[in-house]
Every structure is written in C-alpha cells, then in structure tokens.
Amino acid sequence: MTIYGKSKRNSTRFKRELRVDLKAGGQTVQVYSIDYSVVGIKVAGTTLDLTPGERVELVIEKDGGKVTFYGRVERNDGAHHINRIGREANAFFIKILDEKFPDFVKAMFS
C-alpha cells in the first residue's frame, strides 16, 4: 500500500536507455527506451507524438541483431529527461502484444 492508494506497479521494471526504432503511421522514428517490464516498454523521443490506442512496431537492437515487437500505446507519460541526449522528450508507455516479449526482457536483463 502506498500513501496515495494501491500501487499500480505489479511487475519489475528495468531502467535502460537504448536506441529503439518506432514505426507508427507509416513513419519510422528513432526513440529511446526508458524502462522495460515484462508487460511493455516506456519510450521517449523529442518529436514523438503518439495517441493512446495507436498500434506501433518497435525494433530493438540486441547483440548486433534486431528484434521486432508489435504493441499498442497505453498512455502518454508526459515529459521525461533522456540522459543520453541531455534533453527533455515526450514519453509514452507501450504495451507489447507479443507473447515472446516477457522472455526477451528476462533474457536481456538477467
């Protein structure tokens, strides 16, 4: 229990700023991951503008290769400072719809 009610976070998050390619609406933009959980990924980009409910494709670089996951924008998390680029960026949480994502996260961060 938290001061302001029940905690909404019921899974572990792994903070990691990695470059990710995000495809939405026919365009591909470079964004940065903020943190990962077995449910989804929080990403941010300086010009990123997504709509909750929008379907997206994420291409994540891992061990010199690229892994693709499909997801849905769950919420707009507002501004977030990205240390890698030293700027504020628009942050969004994307729920990953691929059942292989939890295994990917566990393998990536264990």
Image (tube, rainbow, N blue to C red):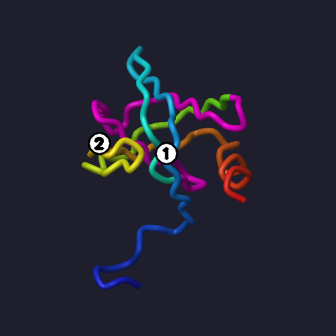
The three-letter code of the residue at mark 1 reads Lys
Q: In the image, what residue occupies the spot 46% across and 67% down?
A: 9
Image check: 28 left or right of 68?
left
Quadrant for the C terminus in the image: bottom right
* Pointer 2 residue: 89
- The quadrant the N terminus occupies is bottom left
Mark 1 = which residue? 95
Q: Residue 37, located in which quarter of the rendered image?
A: bottom right
Looking at the image, do the residues carrying marks 2 and 1 touch, with CB atoms under 8 Å apart? no
Q: CA distance from mark 2 to mark 1?
A: 19 Å
Which tag, 2 or 1, sits closer to the chain's start?
2
Picture coordinates of residue 79 (x, y %)? 25, 49
Residue 55 part of the magenta-drawn span:
yes
Find numbered disc 2 in the image and state the secondary structure of the residue it sits on: strand
Q: Residue at x 32, y 80 (%)?
A: 5
Above-or-below relation of 89 to 80: above
Frontmost residue, 65 versus 58: 65
Which class describes the residues within 10 Å of circle 2: few (<14), some (14-19), or many (20+)?
many
Left or right side of 1 for 58: right
Rendered view: 83 above or below 64 = below
Q: Looking at this view, is 21 or 101 the one in front?
A: 21
Above-or-below relation of 81 to 98: below
Residue beneath the point at 65% across and 45% down? 101
Which element is circle 1 on? strand
Residue 86 in the image: x percent, y percent? 32, 46
Q: How many marks?
A: 2
Crowding at dot 1, Cα within 10 Å, few <14 / some 14-19 / many 20+, comes out as many
Amino acid found under the numbered disc labelled 2: Ala
The segment highlighted magenta reads 36-65
Give residue 84's quadrant in the image: top left
